[in-house]
């Protein structure tokens, strides 16, 4: 995991407290051989840094931004408003919040013209954000496309084996 180096995927989260869940996203990316740039940037607490990050992300070689936040989660939308890169939003459930529904609505209900590809709340979304980022990159990366195909068949194999074990 890196906090400085620029890579094709950036994983940005609103607080250090989001790291526990977002580690799943980072780990999934690493499983696909992608070491992401990881940043803690808050749309509300460090808005200037959020703007600077979004403005310079493409130039730094980032191709997909994953942005995770809880509560009134404006991070993904704030970044999406300042870049043409695809932004994947991960809504998080946090203590004191509304079980992630607050973050889900804040992340998904973007105005027309500024999409945020919003995944599920919490851990499932963190993992899916990584896979979706890989799917985007795999459109122009044959090696990554092959890894994705292998990932899908391994996943299917696990389900098929579990099903078969029930019928033994
Ligand atoms: C959001 O507020 C962060 O993304 C985090 O999910 C939530 C709470 O932040 P902390 O008070 O734990 O720093 O901006």
Image (cartoon, grey):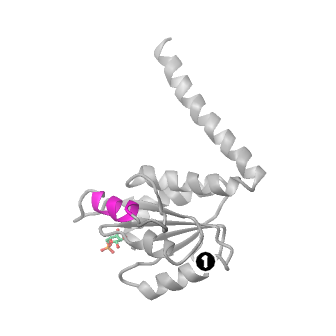
Other-residue count near label 1 (Cα within 10 Å), few / some / many at <14 / 14–19 / ≥20? many
User: Which range is magenta?
Assistant: 101-109
* Left or right: 116 as drawn, with respect to 84: left
Q: Quadrant of the N terminus?
A: bottom right
Cβ at disc 1 under 8 Å from ligand 1: no
Q: Is residue 40 above or below residue 140?
A: below
| Rendered residue at 57%/36% (across/down) | 155
Count of marks, rendered view: 1
Verify whether residue 103 appears in magenta: yes
Q: Seen from this angle, which residue lies furthest bottom?
A: 48
Q: Which residue is mark 1?
A: 57
Q: Position of residue 118 (x, y in %)?
A: 45, 57
Q: Main secondary structure of the magenta part?
A: helix
Give x and y (percent) for residue 12. 49, 71
Q: Tell me residue 31's x, y (percent).
A: 62, 52
Quadrant of the image occupied by residue 13: bottom left
Residue 126 inside the magenta-drawn segment:
no
SS assignment at label 1: helix
Q: Residue at x 44, y 75 (%)?
A: 78
In this view, which residue lies farthest toward the top?
168
Furthest toward the right, the residue is 142
Question: Could you tell me which residue is drawn at 42 percent across and 84 percent down?
Answer: 47
Report x, y in % for residue 158.
56, 30
- Relative to 8, residue 154 above or below: above
Q: Please state which of residues 51 and 8 is positioned toward the viewer in this rendering.
A: 51
């Amino acid at each position: 995991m890196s906090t400085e180096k620029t890579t094709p995927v950036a994983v940005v989260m609103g607080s250090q407290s989001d790291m526990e869940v977002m580690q799943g996203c980072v780990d999934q990316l690493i499983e696909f051989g992608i070491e992401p740039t990881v940043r803690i940037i808050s749309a509300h607490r460090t808005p200037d840094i959020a703007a600077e990050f979004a403005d310079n992300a493409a130039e730094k070689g980032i191709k997909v931004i994953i942005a995770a936040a809880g509560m009134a989660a404006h991070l993904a939308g704030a970044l999406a408003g300042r870049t043409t890169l695809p932004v994947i939003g991960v809504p998080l459930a946090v203590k004191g919040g509304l079980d992630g529904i607050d973050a889900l609505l804040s992340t998904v209900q973007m105005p027309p013209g500024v999409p945020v590809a919003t995944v599920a709340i919490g851990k499932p979304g963190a993992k899916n954000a990584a896979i979706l980022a890989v799917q985007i990159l795999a459109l122009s990366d044959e090696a990554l496309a092959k890894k994705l195909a292998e990932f899908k068949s391994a996943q299917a194999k696990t389900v098929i084996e579990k099903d078969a074990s029930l019928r033994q």
